[in-house]
Image (cartoon, coloured by chain):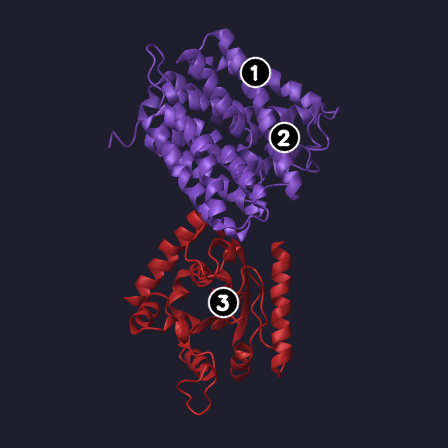
Chain colours: A red, B purple
């Protein structure tokens, strides 16, 4: 049931809304069907980001992909948590690491979700920040990929989302936005810093493509 | 069912002729480029072919929306305005503090088209250039950020003028009262306007390509020539004369109206070109293959629609 609900919401309703009203130009997500499992990493400017990536996925994948979100924001109340869990299929994590208690540790939780067969959507900037300004990438994604190096990561870049719906403003003002995907790839380093540098490089290349 | 689908255009001879002519021209163009492409494989026809293909889709959409059901026509033109507004607004770079005013500008689109729908002429004609033009700057002022506010105020008003107020005259054509002995009605007028405006674009382009030598306004639009301009006006006026049966006008009036459409279409075109030149893009987007964005196709309509509407309104209503 949840699978059908998610497919209907993102594959039809959200997609139509984003395309016709907001003015999002989607990249074709069909190529993701060739990957067994992946982590989509994307720049983060708006609440619309998650919606856009979910809506761009091929319909048969939607229920298998979980956006990673901060528990302090989306898990504030039990109701909000249930809501975002059911309708966005989120994986809630806390922002700080917790090595003593693996059930609470964000890295452990993400690796666990991968082991259960889910793919993930991650925003390595951590927060939406100022509209259309990129922030330094946080190491979490690299730590997860180091533990499961066989999983590919897919860079995605969105332009204009922060104009359509910036942080601190819940009013959507339609603005022509665009989403592009890069090619899926496997990490080629054993250290966090070069991995993050490579990802930043991928983001910059996609940003250039949209210019 | 009869209310949703008004298929009387199949019985209405005047409208039927136009539909056949439009698809005839498109079929001819498609065939022509296909044959030329086979005879001269080195000729670069990719853009022309993409354009023709897009014309098929646009023609089908416009004819479908105008002829099948007039309520759908209002919604379709409003949607066109909305997309054009969004395209231009996204390209122009507003301040973060303008978002509330922009939102209200979006809200004005359905209101303007509703006024056209109910045919309240007085409100329709003042709503954007008076009510909105006074209200939107105020909304920006209330936000308190005065840095660059003049640019934001005037850009927003000009976007509304080009993409909403101008185009909404197309919708109001459908609300004009019936005239005895004139069977094609508002739909005929709308078809006449859109067909003539687009054929004028095509004619100016074609004559410019064939004979173009003397640039008319090189700093704004380097491809526009006097030959294209004059050739376009003459062809459009002649074609307009033969399509006169779609309007309630006399022959002399039709010639004059067609001439006005041709000239104002050119004006709309170069005004949009200058906007594009200022923000440094060639086309407004990539939504229509071969044509650029929506705005690149309807730029002329922003000028021809009000010009045509008010002429018709003055002469015949």
Closest to the camera, between mark 2 and mark 3, is 2
Q: Mark 1 against mark 2, which lies toward the viewer? A: 2
Find residue B73 and report its image quarter.
top left
Residue at image coords 54%, 73%: A152
Residues marked 1 and 2, same chain: yes
10 Å crowding of disc 1: few (<14), some (14-19), many (20+): many
Q: Tell me the chain of label 1.
A: B
Judging from the image, mark 3 belongs to the subunit labelled A
| Residue A207 image-quadrant placement | bottom right
Q: Is residue A56 left or right of residue A3?
A: right
Q: Give the CA separation, mark 1 to mark 2.
A: 17 Å
In this picture, residue A38 sits left or right of residue B111:
right
Farthest residue to the bottom: give it. A100
Category of crowding for the residue at label 3, using alpha-carbon neighbours closer than 10 angstroms: few (below 14), some (14–19), many (at least 20): few
| Front residue of A107 and B310 | B310
- Give the labeled residue for mark 1: B259
Q: Position of residue A30 (x, y in %)?
A: 48, 60
**Count of labels in the image:** 3
- Alpha carbon distance from label 2 to label 3: 48 Å
- How far apart marks 3 and 1 lie (CA) works out to 58 Å
Residue B129 picture location, percent across and down: 47, 31
Residue at label 3?
A34
Secondary structure of the residue carrying tag 3 is helix
């Amino acid at each position: 049931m949840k699978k059908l609900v998610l497919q209907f919401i993102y594959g039809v309703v959200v997609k139509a809304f984003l395309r016709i009203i907001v003015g999002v130009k989607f990249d074709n997500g069909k190529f993701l069907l060739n990957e067994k499992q992946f982590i989509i990493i994307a720049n983060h400017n708006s609440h619309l980001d998650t919606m856009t990536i979910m809506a761009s996925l091929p319909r048969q994948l939607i229920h298998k992909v979980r956006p990673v979100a901060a528990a302090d924001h989306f898990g504030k109340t039990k109701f909000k948590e249930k809501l975002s869990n059911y309708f966005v299929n989120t994986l809630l994590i806390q922002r700080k690491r917790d090595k003593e208690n693996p059930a609470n540790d964000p890295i452990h939780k993400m690796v666990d979700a991968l082991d259960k067969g889910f793919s993930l959507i991650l925003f390595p900037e951590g927060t939406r920040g100022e509209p259309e300004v990129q922030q330094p990438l946080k190491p979490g994604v690299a730590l997860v990929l180091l533990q499961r190096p066989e999983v590919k990561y897919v860079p995605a870049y969105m332009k204009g989302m922060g104009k359509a719906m910036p942080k601190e403003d819940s009013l959507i003002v339609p603005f022509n936005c665009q989403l592009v995907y890069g090619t899926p790839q496997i990490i080629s380093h054993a250290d966090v810093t070069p991995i993050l540098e490579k990802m930043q490089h991928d983001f910059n290349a996609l940003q250039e493509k949209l210019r | 069912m009869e209310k949703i689908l008004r298929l009387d255009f199949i019985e209405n001879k005047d409208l039927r002729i136009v539909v056949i002519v439009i698809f005839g021209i498109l079929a001819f163009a498609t065939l022509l480029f296909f044959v030329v492409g086979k005879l001269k494989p080195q000729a670069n026809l990719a853009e022309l072919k993409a354009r023709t293909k897009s014309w098929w889709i646009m023609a089908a959409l416009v004819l479908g929306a105008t002829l099948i059901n007039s309520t759908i026509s209002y919604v379709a033109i409003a949607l066109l305005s909305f997309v054009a507004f969004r395209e231009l607004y996204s390209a122009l770079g507003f301040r973060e503090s303008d978002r509330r005013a922009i939102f209200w500008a979006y809200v004005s689109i359905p209101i303007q088209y509703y006024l056209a729908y109910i045919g309240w002429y007085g409100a329709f004609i003042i709503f954007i250039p008076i009510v909105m033009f006074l209200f939107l700057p105020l909304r920006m002022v209330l936000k308190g950020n005065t840095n660059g506010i003049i640019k934001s105020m005037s850009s927003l008003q000009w976007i509304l003028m080009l993409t909403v107020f101008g185009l909404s005259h197309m919708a109001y054509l459908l609300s004009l009262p019936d005239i005895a002995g004139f069977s094609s009605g508002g739909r005929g007028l709308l078809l006449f306007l859109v067909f003539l405006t687009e054929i004028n674009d095509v004619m100016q382009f074609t004559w410019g390509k064939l004979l173009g030598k003397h640039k008319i306004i090189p700093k704004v639009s380097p491809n526009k020539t006097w030959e294209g301009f004059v050739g376009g006006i003459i062809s459009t006026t002649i074609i307009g004369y033969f399509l006169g049966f779609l309007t309630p006008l006399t022959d002399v009036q039709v010639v004059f109206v067609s001439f006005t459409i041709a000239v104002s279409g050119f004006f709309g075109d170069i005004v949009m070109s200058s906007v594009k030149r200022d923000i440094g893009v060639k086309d407004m987007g990539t939504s229509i293959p071969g044509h650029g964005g929506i705005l690149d196709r309807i730029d002329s309509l922003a000028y021809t629609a009000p010009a045509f509407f008010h002429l018709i309104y003055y002469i015949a209503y």
